Image (cartoon, grey):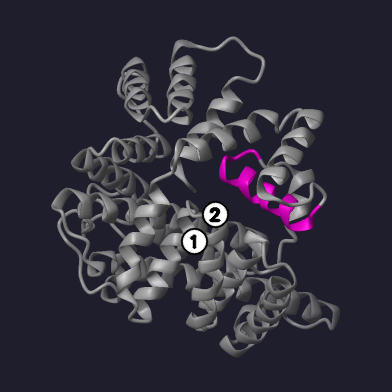
Amino acid sequence: MNFLLQMIGRATLNGAGVRLTPAQLLWKAAASAATKGNFAASLEAYRQYAEIRGGHQSTTELLIRAHLHLAVHEYAEAGHYFSTGIARLHGGREAGSFVSEFRNMTGGTDNRTRMDENHTNRLERMIDAADAHLRQGRYVRAQESFQRARAMVDTLLAAQAGIIVADARENGEAEAGSARPLVGLAKLGDLLLRMLGRTHLAANVAVGLRERSLRDDLAPWATTGENVDDLLRGEFEALREGARLNPDHAEMHYRLGLVARAIGDLQTAEQAFTRVVQLNPHHLLSASRLAATLLQREKKEAVMPLLAVAFAVPAETLKRYEGLAEAASDRPAFERAVVRLCHDLGGRANGKSVRANLAFALGEVGLLDEERAAWREVASAS
């Protein structure tokens, strides 16, 4: 979810053995300049890329451009593009930091993050559709819709964090209270994880009802909040034990943090997300959720420094991701990249956590394939 890493991943995919268009060449130039630490040149290439496409930019491209503006200390422009990207995600005319029902969780919004009251919110529609699928027994569709909604919330979290950092730099202030919108988004993410758990349970209950020739359409109503709690607590215990046995497994800790928040264990969530940012300081989703958790636990002093570090990706880190991305489609080259990276980290090339973290890294640049996804030890509900 780090927008600069997404740029590197797309540049790698664009160069997959085909003749590049002028726009693709500019995209690759922007990514290459960023990995050399020349963010100003990267932004200039990106501006030319937008111009050659007639000014049209996707939501992802808007957020990448925002991150580049942040990297060159153009804070007003960064805030503008983050805000515009959020507006695009919501489908509204103004940027919104979370769906309207959750505004009270944040203590209010400013003009930049207020949604148009008269415009139907895209995220709300997505959640409503997922809920309708669940109630009507279309469990696969419900799961897909809830997952899409969770992905949108993740993007909103990262973009909202960018606005907060840009505003703090532009105004010369670093008040943790300005990060309060992250709390509402994090809580919405918690709710969506619980709804996904409810969908899994309802699907299993429906199978049992059908086997007994009973009405399987009652399954969603037979699934209670206590059932969801039991499911998530079981997964919580499994993930907590997995994190204990694999202290350097970044994604294990990340998933533990997600489930811990969903069951209300903010202390464990704080510990889990803290471990992720120790292993990967620029993982925006962990940093954003950790910031929200710290605010909920009244630990405000660490919030702004945490977010600032998450967005300040050094060139050597981008270069490492670029090398990993370029080698991802070439097995021998990838194995050599694994050995080099493990040597740099002082670890073993066949270490379970090292390969899991490589899969985590490839996921961030959008280049995770099915084979390497098996390294991740994914938990069922999260």
Q: Which residue is mark 1?
A: 286
Residue 124, by quadrant, is bottom left
Lower sequence index among marks 2 and 1:
2
Q: Secondary structure at mark 1?
A: helix
- The answer for how far apart the CA atoms under marks 2 and 1 are is 9 Å
* Residue 181 rendering spot, x and y as whole percentages: 30, 66
* Residue 53 rendering spot, x and y as whole percentages: 36, 19
**Which quarter of the rendered picture does the C terminus lie within?**
bottom right
**Residue 136 is at least partly visible in this image:** no
Residue drawn 57% across the image and 40% down it = 365
Q: Which residue is mark 2?
A: 280
- Numbered disc in front, either 2 or 1: 2
Q: How many residues crowd mark 1 within 10 Å: few (<14), some (14–19), many (20+)?
A: many
Q: Main secondary structure of the magenta part?
A: helix
Which span is picked out in magenta?
351-367
Q: Secondary structure at mark 2?
A: loop
Q: Is residue 51 left or right of residue 13?
A: left
Please tell me whether residue 357 belongs to the stretch shown in magenta.
Answer: yes
* Residue 125 rendering spot, x and y as whole percentages: 41, 58
Please tell me whether residue 274 belongs to the stretch shown in magenta.
Answer: no
- Residue 347, placed above or below residue 136: above
Q: Amino acid at mark 2?
A: Asn
